[in-house]
């Protein structure tokens, strides 16, 4: 019988977004996501710093307001 061609690709990494079954069949919960930072980081390109300092906060507050009104 012919053999299947061997793949030269490395094996895929295990999925991290799906709960993993343990040997007894119980599902383990995914780790809790990290909380959002209160302020944006002060590093990056000048355009990124400008957006973080002057635009992002105002935009976020406006989006929150729109979401609460709908």
Image (cartoon, rainbow, N blue to C red):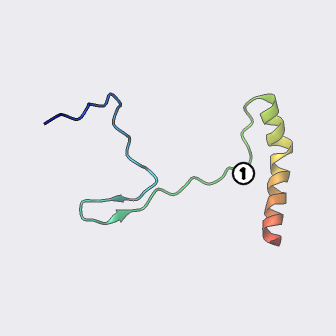
**Left or right side of 25 for 59:** right
Q: Quadrant of the C terminus?
A: bottom right
Percent position of residue 23, x then y? 24, 60
Disc 1, SS: loop
Residue 18 found in image quarter: bottom left
Say if 10 sits above or below 59 in the image. Answer: above
Q: Nearer the viewer, residue 30 or 7?
A: 7
Percent position of residue 53, x then y? 83, 41
Percent position of residue 57, x then y? 81, 50
x 31%, y 66%: residue = 26
Residue 1 found in image quarter: top left
Say if 4 sits above or below 64 in the image. Answer: above
Q: Which residue is mark 1?
A: 38
x 74%, y 47%: residue = 39
x 76%, y 28%: residue = 45
x 80%, y 47%: residue = 56
């Amino acid at each position: 019988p012919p053999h299947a061609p061997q793949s030269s690709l490395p094996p895929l990494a295990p999925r991290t977004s799906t709960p993993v079954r343990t040997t007894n069949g119980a599902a383990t919960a995914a780790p809790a996501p990290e909380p959002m930072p209160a302020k944006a980081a002060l590093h990056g390109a000048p355009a990124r710093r400008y957006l973080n300092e002057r635009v992002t906060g105002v935009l976020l507050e406006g989006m929150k307001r729109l979401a609460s009104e709908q």
